Image: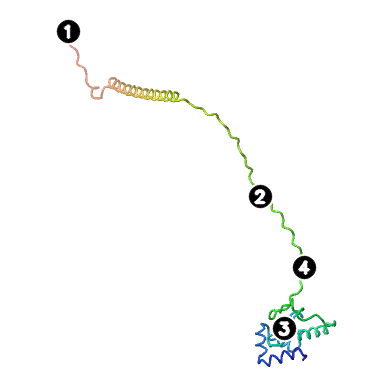
Amino acid sequence: MSAIGAKLKAAREARGLTTSELAASINTLTLVVQNLEDDQFQRLPAPIYVRGFIKLYAQQVGLDPAPLLEEYAAVHARAAGGPPQTAPAAARLKHSRPAPAGCAPEPSLPAAPKPEPPAAPRPKWRFPKFRLPRLKLPAVRIPAEAWQVIGMAAGILALALLLFLGVRETANRRSMAASRDLRLIQEPPAPYLGISTPATPPAGR
């Protein structure tokens, strides 16, 4: 077990915390805590998440995370076959965030294509508006005398119509009465048809 895992485990045990309790305090899995103490960093997500776990672990047990992060940078560089990183740990952690509990790193995604400009909206079709020309008629003013003449003519016409209707009704009634009297004269009632007229005696007897 290397120095990083040993220091973290010793500080945890000094505070009387179990791996489960420590994992719950930094909101991660117990397996992550065990891998950190066993220096099994390759079993954890990307290095940026490992640095976040180390920082949270160290702060929780009262250790300064800067030396541990420097040591992890050297270990990671040797494992990758490159020179150790010389940047300060604070600068490396400035833009890093710890990974959520039990979450694997997201795979890199291709750059999203540039969105196409929105199509121009189609103009809404509307019924054309028609305006009819206004006809201006000349105002005709009728004098008051003309209105009086029109009123008198209308009254005379109404009176003549009433007289015509009255005369016609009277003529119809007279015609019906004359027709009834004539029918009675031409066709006597049935009881009078069987009576014989007495013979007139000869003159001088």
Q: Is 68 left, or right, of 180 in this rendering?
A: right
Mark 2, other Cα within 10 Å: few <14 / some 14–19 / many ≥20:
few
Residue type at the position of mark 1:
Ala
Q: Which residue is mark 3?
A: 55
C-alpha distance separating marks 4 and 3: 31 Å
C-alpha distance separating marks 4 and 2: 37 Å
Q: Which residue is mark 2?
A: 124
Image depth: mark 1 or mark 3 in front: 3
Please determine whether, in this image, residue 134 is positioned above or below residue 40: above
Mark 1, other Cα within 10 Å: few <14 / some 14–19 / many ≥20:
few
Task: From the viewer's side, name the closer residue of 179 and 160.
Answer: 160
* Residue contact at pointers 1 and 3, CB within 8 angstroms: no
Residue type at the position of mark 3:
Lys
Secondary structure of the residue carrying numbered label 2:
loop
Secondary structure of the residue carrying numbered label 1:
loop
Residue type at the position of mark 2:
Lys
Q: Which residue is mark 4?
A: 111
Residue 203, disc:
1
Image depth: mark 4 or mark 1 in front: 4
Q: Residue at x 23, y 22 (%)?
A: 192
* Residue contact at pointers 4 and 3, CB within 8 angstroms: no
Residue 184, disc:
none
C-alpha distance separating marks 4 and 1: 158 Å
